Image (tube, coloured by chain):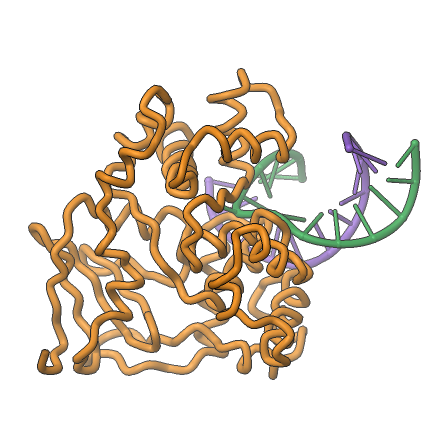
Chain colours: A orange, B green, C purple
DNA sequence: GACCAGGACCATT
DNA sequence: AATGGTCATGGT
């Protein structure tokens, strides 16, 4: 394929708005009926049209696999949703209200760092922190004429070179020492983010939770959103509320019990089910 | 001015 | 094993 700035990706059952606002990614901006972000150091705008997502880049591309991987456009959603328990009324309601919601496939470092920053923060605030961090410490990327400046997510090297105080100036509070420590461990080779890919879910979770500031919930976010482990099942306050409300008569239930329930109830794509429940309760029932 | 947020960690029971 | 306090910060 000759290099070009524009590509129409054929899609069906793909709701870009729901996907971008469902708390997976924090560095994308809504613009002109679509979204603008940076993937693999490429500025890209995405706009839904009939049957396609139209992607426009700032520099000519001959290989678009970085984008199709990120968007997971090859995933056939109906087949995936068909693995959900059919007798689960609440989950089926979530599937209906969140029609076209997708899981993205993010670069591990950006995902890990973002979710280290997410701890007990609202999504709007996480977006603010990530935006500030990228603008101050990320490498600028080429943008089309007339567009706002855009920045890649800071690499582990870029963050490891900073001080905790500099990071705190990005309003991340006590999370600064966690982010700095994670970046330095990656740079030192003590944590190999690529090798995690080939581990079992349990071993991978164990590796990630060795980082300070990374517990089971944040680890599962990274395992699901970056590595694509289909049964990783992050349980935050919203998902915990949804599970307790839908399956435990509203009784507050210990996280470990919720975990075991999720593992046996939701099937081979439990992580996807989790994302539907999360977005459903946040947009419909909140 | 409370109250809460895609939590994790540590000290007490 | 199970609670309770603490950590920063800003939106609602």
**Count of picture labels:** 0
State the residue at coordinates (14%, 77%).
A5
Residue A61 sits above or below residue C1 on the image: below
Using residue A203 as the reference point, say whether residue A67 is left or right of it.
Answer: left
Quarter the N terminus of chain A occupies:
bottom left
Residue at the (48%, 76%) spot, across then down:
A154
Q: Is residue B5 left or right of residue A173?
A: left
Q: Position of residue A203 (x, y in %)?
A: 59, 55
What is the quadrant of residue A283 in the picture?
top left
Residue A88: quadrant of the picture:
top left
Residue name at image x 15 percent, y 54 percent: A48
Residue A245: percent from left, percent from top: 50, 22
Tell me: residue A76, above or below residue A153: above
Q: Is residue A48 left or right of residue A22?
A: left
Q: Quadrant of residue A18?
A: top left
Residue A103 visible in image: yes
In front of the other: A12 or A175: A12
Q: Is residue A174 visible?
A: no
Residue C12 drawn at (x, y percent)? 46, 40
Quarter of the image for the C terminus of chain A: give it: top left
Q: Residue furthest left?
A: A50
Image position, residue A63 (x, y; %): 20, 76
């Amino acid at each position: 394929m000759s290099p070009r700035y524009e590509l129409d990706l054929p899609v069906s059952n793909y709701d870009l708005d729901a996907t971008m606002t469902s708390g997976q990614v924090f560095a994308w901006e809504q613009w002109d009926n679509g979204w603008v972000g940076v993937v693999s150091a490429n500025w890209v705008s995405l706009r839904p049209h009939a049957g396609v997502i139209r992607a426009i880049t700032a520099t000519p591309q001959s290989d678009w696999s970085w984008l199709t991987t990120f968007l997971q456009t090859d995933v056939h959603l109906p087949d995936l949703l068909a693995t959900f328990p059919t007798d689960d009324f609440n989950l089926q309601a979530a599937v209906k209200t969140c029609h076209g919601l997708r899981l993205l496939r993010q670069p591990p470092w950006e995902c890990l760092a973002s979710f280290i920053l997410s701890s007990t923060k609202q999504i709007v605030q996480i977006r603010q922190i990530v935006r500030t961090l990228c603008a101050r410490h990320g490498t600028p990327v080429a943008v089309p004429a007339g567009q706002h400046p855009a920045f890649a997510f800071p690499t582990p090297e870029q963050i490891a070179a900073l001080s905790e105080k500099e990071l705190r100036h990005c309003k991340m509070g006590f999370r600064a020492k966690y982010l700095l420590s994670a970046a330095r461990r990656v740079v030192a080779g003590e944590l190999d983010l690529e090798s995690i890919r080939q581990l079992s879910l349990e071993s991978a979770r164990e590796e990630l939770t060795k980082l300070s500031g990374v517990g089971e919930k944040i680890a599962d976010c990274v395992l699901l959103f970056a590595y694509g482990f289909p049964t990783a099942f992050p349980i935050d306050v919203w998902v915990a509320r949804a599970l307790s409300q839908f399956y435990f008569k509203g009784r507050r239930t210990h996280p470990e019990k919720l975990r075991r329930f999720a593992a046996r109830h939701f099937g081979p794509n439990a992580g996807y089910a989790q994302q539907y429940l999360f977005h459903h309760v946040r947009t419909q029932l909140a």
